[in-house]
Image (cartoon, helix red, strand yellow):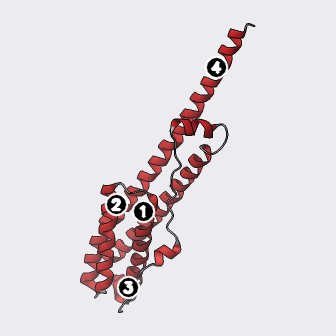
Amino acid sequence: MTTTTIILIIVAVLAVGLIVIYNGLITTRNRVDEAWNDIKIQLKRRFELIPDLMKTVQAAIKLDEKLLTEITKLRSQAADMDSKDAGPAERADVEGQLNGLMGQLKIQVEAYPDIKSHGEISQFMTELTDTQDKIMAAQRFYNGMVRDFNTKIQVFPTNMFALMLGFKAYEFFEVTEAEQMKSDIKLDV
């Protein structure tokens, strides 16, 4: 074998390796983006559900005005983040606070025994709980994809190519329990 042939074989092997690594990174990055869009879809579903739920509940019982104002404010902030295409870290704080307030709304609704007989409210609460479960499932899937992608760009030899090709780590979407409980709202039930 000549030196030229050996060099060509080495270059070909490196090129194939680079192509395989690049395609793997692109595939994983696309899965992360898809998972993030799944979260955004579920959050949008919840945003659309909240006003109808609040109107229906407010018609049936007297709700704490501070709670309604705070939910509306946080819902607007979250909607603004959609238009700004905010990332997971920025959304996590607002989402955590909104989750906590929606929990307070649920507690307030449950404080009225007659409310359970109101089918529309019961349906909205079930839908809200279902949506929250879907958001958490989408969050787990997204974080799993982020973990896989971030691991790929940190291990050798992929990390060398990822750095050269400009791949950057994604942020996890984490809404901690403490963030969910952040709220100065005191219920007057």
* Viewer-closest of 119 and 135: 135
- The amino acid at mark 4 is Val
- The amino acid at mark 1 is Glu
> Is 154 situated above or below 4?
below
For disc 2, the neighbor class at 10 Å (few under 14, some 14 to 19, many from 20) is some
Farthest residue, direction bottom: 189
Q: Nearer the viewer, mark 4 or mark 3?
A: 4
Does the CB distance between marks 4 and 2 fall below 8 Å?
no
Quarter residue 102 falls in: bottom left
Q: CA distance from mark 4 to mark 3?
A: 65 Å
In the rendered image, which residue does mark 3 sit on? 185
Q: Residue at x 52, y 74 (%)?
A: 177
In the rendered image, which residue does mark 4 sit on? 11
Residue 95, position as x, y percentages in the image: 41, 68
For disc 4, the neighbor class at 10 Å (few under 14, some 14 to 19, many from 20) is few
- The amino acid at mark 2 is Met
Q: Nearer the viewer, mark 1 or mark 3?
A: 1
Does the CB distance between marks 4 and 1 fall below 8 Å?
no
Along the polypeptide, which appears first: circle 4 or circle 1? 4
Does the CB distance between marks 2 and 1 fall below 8 Å?
yes
Q: Secondary structure at mark 1?
A: helix
* Viewer-closest of 1 and 33: 1
Q: From where the camera sits, is residue 171 visible? A: yes
Q: Secondary structure at mark 3?
A: loop
Residue 17, position as x, y percentages in the image: 63, 28
